[in-house]
Image (tube, rainbow, N blue to C red):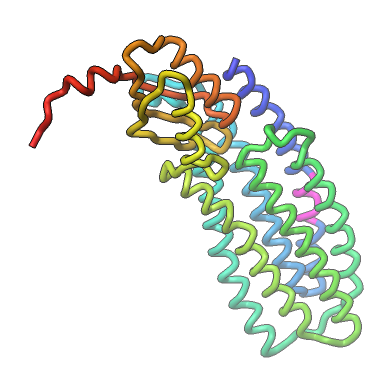
Amino acid sequence: MESIRSHYLHNEQRWRLQVVLAITVLYFVAELTTGWLIDSLALLSDALHMLTDIATVCLALFTLWISSRPASAGKTYGYVRAEILGAVFNGLILWVLVAFLWLEAVQRLRNPPVLNGLPLMIIAGIGILMNFLLVWITLGPRRSARGIALRAIMTHALADLVGSAGVLIAGALTYLGWRRADSAVSLFIGCLIIFGSWGLIREGVDILMESVPAGVNLDELKKDLLKISGTRELHDLHVWCLTSHQFALSAHAVVAEDADQDRVLSDISALLEHKFNIRHMTVQLERDNRREREPSHF
C-alpha cells in the first residue's frame, strides 16, 4: 500500500514539474532576449535566476526518477534521499550565482547604464502572471503530494514572483529617470534568492543529519507511547526522516510481565501511523522482569 501511494505521488509530482519546465523555458528565452537587447542587469539577473530554475526543475525530475528506483541488497532504503541531495545542491549553486550577481550590480551602481524602462515593465508584467501560474501548479490540490523537490520549485516560483515585481518597479523608476534602479533591484533579487533557498538547504541538511522531523514533538510522542497500556519505559528512542514525507522510528519499550506483546506492538504501530505519520518503525519489546533479573555492573 505504501509503495502504491509513493508511486502515485511521484507521478503527480513529475507531471507538475514537466508543466513548470515548459513554461519556465519559454519565459527564460523571452526574458534573456529582452535583457540582452536593452542591456538591463535586473532583467538579465532575473533571467539567470530563471536559468537556475530550469536547472532546478531538471535536477528535480532526475532525482524523482532516481528516488523511485527500487531498493537493492546494497541500498535497502532505495534512492529516496537523492531528492534531498538534489535540493541541497541546487541551493548551494544559487548562492554562488548570487555572489557574481552582486559583484556586477555594485559595479553598475558606480556607473549606471542608460536603459529603456518600458520593455522592462512589459516583460516583468508577463513574469508576474507566469509566476502566479507556476505557484498554482506547484501548490496542487493536496499538500501530501508536495515533496521537497516540488516545494523547492514552489520556493523558486515565489521568489521569481517577487523578483518580477521588483523588475516592474525598476522599469517604472528607470522610465522616470532613476538610472540606478536597475542595479538596486538586482541586489534585491539576490537577497530574495538567498532568503528563499535557506529554508530548503536547512531542511535538506537536517534530513541528511537524521534530525528529528520538524513536525514531530519528541516529548509528546514519548508521553503518548508511555500511555499505551502495558508500557512501562522507553529508551533508545530515535525519530528521523528518510526523505521529506517518510519518517522512521526505532525504540526499545519495556512492557509489563503480564502484558500482551502483540497488542502493545499493534497499539504502538497504530499510534505512530495515525498521529505522527510514522510508517517505518522498529520497536524492540523487553519484559519488565527481564530487566530486574539483569545483574548490576559496577
Work out whether 24 lies above or below 11: below
Main secondary structure of the magenta stretch: helix
Residue 81 placement (x, y as % from top left): 49, 36
In the depicted view, which residue is nearer to us: 264 or 130? Answer: 264
Point 52% across, 41% down: residue: 217
Q: Quadrant of residue 119?
A: bottom right
Relative side of 169 to 109, left or right: right
Residue 269 placement (x, y as % from top left): 50, 20
Q: Residue furthest bottom?
A: 110
Q: Is residue 79 in view?
A: no
Work out whether 108 lies above or below 132: below
In the picture, which quadrant includes the C terminus? top left
Relative side of 139 to 270, left or right: right
Point 76% across, 64% down: residue: 163
In the depicted view, which residue is nearer to us: 222 or 238? Answer: 222
In the picture, which quadrant includes the N terminus? top right
Q: Is residue 129 in view?
A: yes
Work out whether 155 lies above or below 15: below
The tally of labels here is: 0
Relative side of 150 to 122, left or right: left
Residue 289 placement (x, y as % from top left): 25, 17
Work out whether 252 lies above or below 149: above
Point 68% across, 83% down: residue: 108
In the depicted view, which residue is nearer to us: 1 or 138? Answer: 1
Point 71% across, 38% down: residue: 17
Residue 16 placement (x, y as % from top left): 74, 36
Numbered range of the magenta stretch: 23-29
Q: Quadrant of residue 143?
A: top right
Q: Is residue 251 magenta?
A: no
